Image (cartoon, coloured by chain):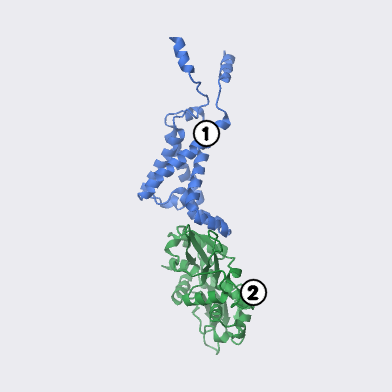
Chain colours: A green, B blue
Amino acid sequence: MRVAEAMTRDFLTARAEEDLGEAARRMVERWVGSAIVEADSPGSAPGILTERDVVEVVGAGNDPRRTRVADHFTPEATSAAPDWPLERAAEAMHRGGVRHLVVTHGDPVGVVSIVDIMRSWTSERRRHLTVQIREAMRRDFLEVEGTETVGEAARQMVERGLGAAVVAAAKPKSPPGLVTDREILVVAAAGRDPGTEQVADHLSKRMTFSAPDWSLKQAADAMTKGGFHHIAVVDRNGTAGVISISDVVGRLLA
Amino acid sequence: MTVVRRVRRAALPTVGEGQRLLAGVGRGTLAAMTMTALRQVTTGLGLVDQTPPDAILKQRAFGVVVRTPRLAFFLATRQVALVELAHWFYGAVGGAAFTRLPLSMRRHKWVGFGYGLATWIGFELSVAPVLGLDQARRIRPIERLMFAVDHVLYGVVLAGDRDWAGAERRLPGRRRRTRLARR
């Protein structure tokens, strides 16, 4: 399958001079994780603003409403051509540690995300994922208390280069929660103060749990069907790890 | 003459259907527990990688519970106990089904062996492919053999001495009295 078949053509754009809070609001409204920022000069590659950039601003303790897109987007974003096979796009993401590629054909024609790739790869392709989740999950996950602020969680996530943090359960034996880049983006978009908002009030609703010995293929299917980017891996002793969509794609490329 | 025979048969006290079904459920559960014990050994020795109930939970259940995180959490944290309970439940259902076999079959010498083997073949040929379990595709010959063995054990324990499954209850002392009377 080619990038052109999987990409989102109806992509969001942001202006370099607009404030980050407004860009975040539009990203949440469209439920996308990135916006293309037009190139400064004709002929140069377009830039990209992602939810990760917003998390970095929040993590640094800055107010997204008083910050300009121009100061935080990635100029000359990693790009792909529409006729690239999806594997090539996935490899480019994996190498660059990014989750979105701007698809250009002279001008930007779309955005392809890691979710688009997972969704487009057929079930047959995912059948190669014969290993258990424990072999692909991240064991050095970040755990935060529900009483911590969103800003503090964002700071730790940025510091550790993670897209999600496990939120410790309020009671023993209760399910823990997850807070991801997306929830932090939502807080920023709503104009709330990440320095006072508690993590427990912004837990991800799009998440689920698995055991470490469940099949990775099932995790991949669950992510595709449920629209999850992260799954909390639990066992009898509590949280054992977190598996992200990037971990699954990385395993598929291996 | 025929009428007389019928009357005699009806006069004999019989085990009720409900009672037999209950006995089947009980013996089926017991047989499944015995099978579990054997599986502890075969998995411990590395002869079996993943048992069928395990395979169902780990390969298929996730897809079902994925949109209910609390249920997924419950399954993931208690899967060892749940797998065993599920297995015992299958065993109980198998035990109940056993009581529906014709009496002549239930009393056959090899019924336990045959029934155990049939449950395994049934799983291999119908349930596993329908569920799309990897079990059906990637099973090693030694695992296949071990599954056949533990299902045979299930069948043998389930059938037991076969008296419990009889339609007629043996009257205590009746045979002895008859023999004595003949003497």
State the residue at coordinates (49%, 43%): B88
Please say if the residues under marks 2 and 1 sit with CB atoms less than 8 Å apart.
no
Visible residue check, residue A8: no
Helix, strand or loop at mark 1: helix
Name the mark on residue B23: 1
Q: Is residue B138 left or right of residue B21?
A: left
Give the mark count.
Answer: 2
Residue occupying the far top of the picture: B183
Assess disc 1: are there few (<14), some (14-19) or many (≥20) residues with their C-alpha within 10 Å of its C-alpha.
some
Name the mark on residue B68: none
Q: Position of residue A150 (x, y in %)?
A: 57, 74
What type is the residue that disc 2 sits on? Answer: Glu
Most foreground residue, B5 or A148: A148
Q: Is residue B138 above or below residue A59?
A: above
Q: Alpha-carbon distance for marks 2 and 1?
A: 61 Å
State which chain disc 1 sits on. Answer: B
Helix, strand or loop at mark 2: helix
Q: Is residue A105 above or below residue B152?
A: below
Q: Which residue is mark 2?
A: A29
State which chain disc 2 sits on. Answer: A
Assess disc 2: are there few (<14), some (14-19) or many (≥20) residues with their C-alpha within 10 Å of its C-alpha.
few
| Quadrant including the C terminus of chain B | top left
| Quadrant including the N terminus of chain B | top right
Q: Position of residue A120 (x, y in %)?
A: 52, 66
What type is the residue that disc 1 sits on? Answer: Ala
Q: Position of residue A149 (x, y in %)?
A: 57, 74
Visible residue check, residue B61: yes
Q: Is residue A44 above or below residue A166?
A: below
* Labels 2, 1: front one: 1
